[in-house]
Image (tube, rainbow, N blue to C red):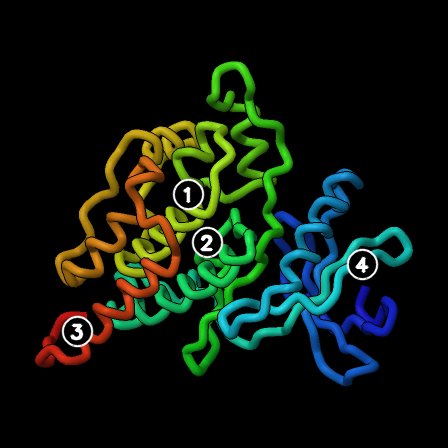
Amino acid sequence: MIDKVLGHYRIVSKLGEGGMGVVYRARDQVLQRDVALKFLGETLAREARQLLLREARAASALSHPNICTVHEVGEAGGEFYIVMELIEGKPLNVSIGSEGLPYESVMRYGAQIAGALAHAHGRNIVHRDLKSSNVIVTPEGLVKVLDFGLARRLVAETQDTGTRTMDTLESAVTTGGTLSYMSPEALRGEPGDHRSDLWALGVVLYEAAAGQVPFHGRTTFEVSSAILREPPPPLPARVPPGLAAIIQRCLVKEPALRYQRASEVQAALEAIQSATAMAPPSDQR
């Protein structure tokens, strides 16, 4: 694949691989810039790939400093691809240690992620697979959210009971989200909306503050059961009460009782950032 030419893109090196395909660094030989080129997985049915391409085309209309720009989507020689902005930085999950990040960083990154969600939601685009590995932090501290709209659920909802069987749950995790970040309504097989993204944001904030996601288990069933029924464990004492309250409200099981808009989360995080900046110095993280 290296040195292969696809349209006016020459593939330079492999960057990584995920559930939706392989990502390469490529050179745009017309504009003379490096880009990220994602091939959609060959295991996806053609209809599914077409659906993802439609989602990517919608996402390409998003223009926000905290959203990875989609430059182009298309097909060449039977291969479906998405051309995106190449971002130099580290995934957030790589930066989070076992003790979590300093709370100042959690608030700063969280406000940027919430701003990205607010921009997308205002244009009727829901992320559907927000997680710490889909968030890149540049050396300058700028957050970029990847893969907006690309995790559209591709499995049929269970019609008779309103809940997923284990088979449909496994399929949903594979094609429509990552289990640890999935909302209770998604696990119940309900359509979900932008508030499911706010649940996932709460999981990301919790993970960044505590060093681990809030819901655990040895099996898919145990993790799902915890998400559906258990409250998140208390955050470490070093996490400021204001930040803990924001995270807890994002992680309310009932969507109607969460924040209703990402802009509300952004405003709340920015408010406690300002309050923290004016507070006397402390030796807390």
Q: Quarter holding the N terminus? A: bottom right
Q: Secondary structure at mark 4?
A: strand
Q: Which residue is mark 4?
A: 74
Query: Is residue 153 depicted above or below 168 in this figure?
Result: below
Q: From the image, state whether disc 4 or disc 1 is nearer to you.
A: 4
Disc 2: which residue: 131
In the image shown, does 112 or 255 lie closer to the viewer? 255
Mark in front: 3 vs 4: 3
Q: Earlier in the sequence, mark 1 or mark 3?
A: 1
Work out how far the residue at label 4 is from the one at label 1, CA to CA, in angstroms: 31 Å
The residue under label 3 is 275
At 44% from the left and 28% from the top, the residue drawn is 188
Q: Quadrant of residue 37?
A: bottom right
Residue tagged by mark 1?
180
How far apart marks 1 and 3 lie (CA) works out to 31 Å
Disc 2 is placed on an element classified as loop
Q: Identify which amino acid the numbered label 3 is placed on.
A: Ala
Q: Secondary structure at mark 3?
A: helix
Left or right: residue 149 compared with residue 239:
right
The local secondary structure at tag 1 comes to helix
Labels in figure, total: 4
Categorize mark 4 by other alpha carbons within 10 Å: few (<14), some (14-19), many (20+): some
The answer to which of marks 2 and 1 sits earlier in the sequence is: 2
Hey, which residue is sitting farthest right in the picture?
77
Measured in 3D between alpha carbons, the distance from the residue under mark 2 to the one under mark 3, in whole angstroms, is: 27 Å
Amino acid residing under circle 1: Ser
Q: Report the mark closest to the observer, 2 or 4.
A: 4
First of labels 4, 1 by sequence position = 4
**Mark 2 vs 1: CB contact within 8 A:** yes
Q: Position of residue 33 (x, y in %)?
A: 72, 82
Whether residue 236 sits left or right of residue 75 in the image: it is left
